[in-house]
Structures are given as C-alpha cells and as structure tokens.
Amino acid sequence: MFGQLPLRPTVGFECTGAPGLLQQMVAGAPAGSRICVAGINGDPDTIEPAQAALKELDIRFSL
C-alpha cells in the first residue's frame, strides 16, 4: 500500500455466508491479502470496494 508497508502473504477464508462478514474481512485484512469466499449468503450483502482496492486485496468466489 503506497510502497510503505511490507506485504505479507495472507489468505483468509469466508466459509459461513454470514451477512456482513465479508466486509469485516476486507476491513481487517492486511494490504495485499487474498480473501477466498466459499460461503453462500442468500440475501444481498455489501462491501466497500474502495477499501478493498486501496489495500489491493484479491477477492475470489467459489463453490
């Protein structure tokens, strides 16, 4: 992030589909992290894409 923080390879897994949890992971993940989303939430959920972009997060969805 802006060339100041050392990037640590961090991977977080969201497997529950609980509402709001993905945004909590975006907020708490270190810069350069990957978030793997395997939990399915049947209802709409929101994240802050600007926060994820500034941290250069890699968010992947799978079944």
Image (cartoon, rainbow, N blue to C red):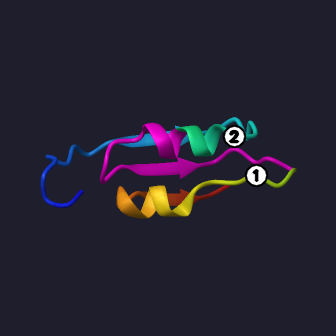
Q: In terms of secondary structure, where does tag 1 sit?
A: loop
9 left or right of 48? left
Tell me the kind of residue under disc 1. Asp
Q: In terms of secondary structure, where does tag 2 sit?
A: loop
| Residue 31, x across and y down, in percent | 31, 49
Tell me the kind of residue under disc 2. Gly
Name the residue that disc number 2 marks.
20
Residue 15 among those drawn in magenta = no
Name the residue that disc number 1 marks.
45
The residue lying furthest to the right in this view is 43
Near-viewer residue (26 or 17): 26
Near-viewer residue (30 or 9): 30
Q: CA distance from mark 2 to mark 1?
A: 7 Å
| The quadrant where residue 22 appears | top right
| Residue 3, x across and y down, in percent | 13, 59
Instruction: Count the labels in the image.
Output: 2
| Residue 14, x across and y down, in percent | 59, 40
Residue sitting at x 30%, y 54% = 32
| Residue 4, x across and y down, in percent | 12, 52
Assess whether mark 1 and mark 2 are in contact (beta carbons under 8 angstroms): yes
User: What numbered label is drawn on residue 63?
Assistant: none
36 left or right of 15? left
Query: Which segment did they paint magenta?
Result: 25-42
